Image: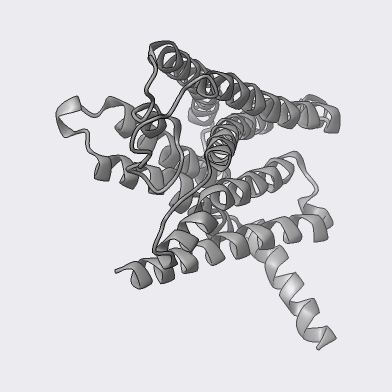
């Protein structure tokens, strides 16, 4: 099974890298995609590459190694970047929801509302929140002491399985983790939800069915990606303790840290006509050069 799993996750990782790099290159290469929506999509693809690269390469090495290990510093570093990537992705998706709100609800003021300066500030804010969230939890994790059998029942160094190995009291660290995750997740979710409540109310006011369909089509990719993220998070944090298990935790973790980064570029390329058109143009130029 080790070789089979290695091949499966290697293919997933290569698709993730290839898909997200193609999205980033297409957005940079095509001047028609130099808009706020694609600016955020570019950063979402970059976050997805980071998110997947934090865990998958080490996992692949462990599939082939007899002694599956990671240093304590490496484990803490992995935990830091997992927390950073997760928070940054959530808030970049919130910024994308706000962008759709501005485009649909206030189209005449769109370029003013979503100026380059504001877009950069929103992305910088997402990264700043991610760094703060990761630093906060890492500082408390560094105070833990590990003196027993240091075997993590997980494929990556996420904080919850790490806390179970500590010889010292973990109550404060757990409170900080759950408070920060709940606070930032709720803020991100509410920002996205409020944006879509306004979008839906605006769309319902459009008399033409074709007009409503066109507006919803511009949001469909984002809604699918947001749904994947929050549905997994909801199932992870609301499942009863009676069904809590190492295997279930690993499945949810694989979904949001490995599968979602792979699916995001596929969803955006399949559901977005502008991306598909730009991709065809780029491929046409490459064929011409050959």
- Which quadrant is the N terminus positioned in? bottom left
Which is more toward the observer, 118 or 153? 153
Taking the spot 62% from the left edge, 28% from the top edge, the residue there is 130
Q: Is residue 76 above or below residue 53?
A: above
Where residue 89 appears, as percent x and y from the top left, is: 58, 36
* Residue 118: percent from left, percent from top: 79, 26
Screen quadrant of the C terminus: bottom right
Front residue of 71/15: it is 71
Could you tell me if residue 279 is visible in this image? yes
Query: Up-down: is 182 above or below 57?
Result: above
Q: From this viewpoint, which residue is outermost toward the left?
A: 242
Q: Residue at x 47, y 62 (%)?
A: 60
Picture colour scheme:
one colour
Q: Count all numbered tags in the image, as a single digit.
A: 0
Q: Which residue reaches farthest bottom? A: 290
Residue 182 vs residue 70, the one in the foreground? 70
Query: Residue 227: which quarter of the image?
Result: top left
* Quadrant position of residue 250: top left
- The image shows residue 136 at horizontal and vertical percentages of 59, 19
| Location of residue 150 in the rendering, given as x and y in whole percent from the top left corner | 38, 38
In the image: residue 140, left or right of residue 102: left
Quarter of image, res 76: top right
Residue drawn 54% across the image and 65% down it: 15
- Vertical placement of residue 42 versus 205, above or below: below
Residue 160 falls left or right of residue 284: left
Q: In this orientation, does residue 30 appear? A: no
């Amino acid at each position: 099974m080790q070789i089979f799993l290695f091949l499966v996750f290697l293919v997933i990782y290569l698709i993730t890298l290839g898909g997200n790099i193609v999205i980033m290159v297409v957005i940079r290469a095509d001047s028609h995609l130099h808009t706020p929506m694609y600016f955020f999509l570019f950063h979402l693809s970059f976050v997805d590459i980071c998110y997947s690269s934090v865990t998958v390469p080490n996992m692949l090495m462990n599939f082939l190694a007899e002694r599956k290990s990671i240093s304590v510093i490496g484990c803490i570093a992995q935990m830091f970047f997992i927390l950073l990537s997760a928070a940054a992705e959530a808030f970049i998706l919130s910024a994308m929801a706000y962008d759709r709100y501005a485009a649909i609800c206030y189209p005449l003021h769109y370029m003013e509302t979503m100026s380059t300066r504001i877009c950069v500030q929103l992305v910088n804010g997402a990264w700043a929140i991610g760094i703060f969230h990761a630093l906060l939890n890492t500082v408390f994790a560094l105070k833990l002491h590990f003196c027993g059998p240091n075997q993590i029942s997980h494929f990556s160094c996420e904080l919850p399985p790490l806390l179970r190995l500590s010889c010292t009291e973990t109550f404060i660290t757990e409170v900080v983790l759950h408070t920060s995750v709940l606070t930032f997740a709720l803020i991100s979710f509410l920002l996205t939800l409020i944006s879509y409540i306004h979008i839906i109310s605006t769309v319902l006011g459009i008399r033409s069915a074709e007009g409503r369909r066109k507006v919803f089509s511009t949001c469909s990719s984002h809604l699918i990606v947001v749904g994947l993220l929050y549905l997994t998070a909801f199932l992870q944090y609301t499942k009863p303790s009676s069904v809590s298990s190492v295997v279930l935790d690993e499945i949810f973790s694989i979904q949001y840290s490995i599968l979602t980064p792979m699916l995001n570029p596929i969803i955006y390329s399949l559901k977005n006509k502008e991306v598909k058109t730009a991709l065809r143009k780029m491929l046409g130029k490459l064929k011409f050069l050959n």
